[in-house]
Amino acid sequence: MYTKTYVAGIQLNATFSDGSETFTVDSEGEEIRGRLTSHVCTLQAGIVAYKVTLNDGTVSLLSNRSEDEFLTPMQVLSIDHLNLADNGASTLRSPSSLGGYSTIGGFQYAGDVLFSSTATLNFGGPVSSTVLDGSLANQQLANSSESEYHQSFTDPMPVMLDALRDIAFRASVRAAKDNASLPDAAQEVPYTGTDERTVYVTDRRYLAAAAVISLVSVAAVAATLWGWWELGREVSGSPLEIAKAFGAPLFDSMGSNVPWDKIPKEVAREKIQYGERVERGGRRSSFRDLGRPGQLIFERDGDVKNPTAGELYGE
């Protein structure tokens, strides 16, 4: 078996116009001249400590990249043999490993799918155009000037690094979940938890004000009932008893001092209605004939009609 170990990584390359220098066309109109900025970043495989937050079973990165702690670099083991051995947690299989998967190759593929993007300036004099291919170029377009020579882009490197960092973190969590026998697959970490609870606190000033208002309301209502004992009989305050007290014609045949509990029995055979009084035969009352407001009363069905919305009624 022939093996070879080496440090593995992924190289990110971003070349873009940041707008610091405007593109110009030469005097003959055949060339476009300008300056491009190149930003190259090489990512190395390793064991990293992240600051995370756990909320309702969902884990998320808490800090930015500068706060990640790079603990141990990892080597990639290239094995040119069909029977691949288990090489432990400090090595990764390279894209050239026969008969097996490639961890580094997976991240490289994800980066290629997410970040492969170009912006092509097609020079054609007054009909020049810029073609943006891929989402990254569209996202990082800093301006959309009418002139194709003045378009600029922001540096896409932070976006690519943040995305790959998140992918690497979630891949490591899933790998530990699916391979519990791996070293350090299960870890105990200290954490600080928070719990929100609703606590009600009484403001005694508002409580005293509310109590005073309630007592004043009770006193105001009680004042209207003061002297009830001078009536000489029990009263119920029912609608029928109140209607009789105000002289509704329906109750003319009853005695003036009929107990409140006997009134329903006296009118049990009558169908009564509350509404606008009319004369028998459908003619309205003399109040309406004289131009006075109508009157709402309890009366036998047929002697009253339903009140009219917006109509003014008198006593």
Image (cartoon, grey):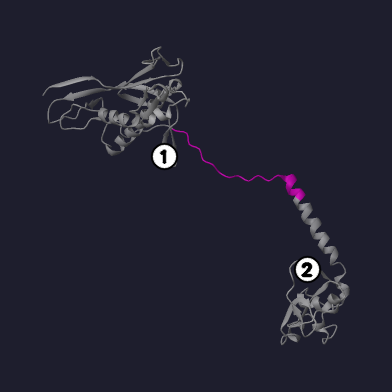
Q: Amino acid at mark 2?
A: Glu
Comparing 200 with 174, the one in front is: 174
Q: Amino acid at mark 1?
A: Thr
Comparing 313 with 299, the one in front is: 313
Q: Residue at x 37, y 17 (%)?
A: 38
- Res 96 → quadrant: top left
Q: Secondary structure at mark 1?
A: strand
Q: Residue at x 73, y 48 (%)?
A: 207
Comparing 274 with 18, the one in front is: 18
The magenta segment is 191-209
Q: Secondary structure at mark 2?
A: loop
Magenta span contains residue 276: no
Q: Is residue 293 left or right of residue 182?
A: right
Residue bearing mark 1: 58
Residue 311, which numbered label? 2
- Res 183 → quadrant: top left
Q: Quadrant of the C terminus?
A: bottom right
Measured in 3D between alpha carbons, the distance from the residue under mark 1 to the one under mark 2, in whole angstroms, is: 64 Å
Residue 194 % position (x, y):
50, 38
Looking at the image, do the residues carrying marks 1 and 2 touch, with CB atoms under 8 Å apart? no
Q: Is residue 193 left or right of residue 8?
A: right
Residue 105 % position (x, y):
25, 29
Residue farthest along the left direction in this orientation: 1
Foreground tag (1 vs 2):
2
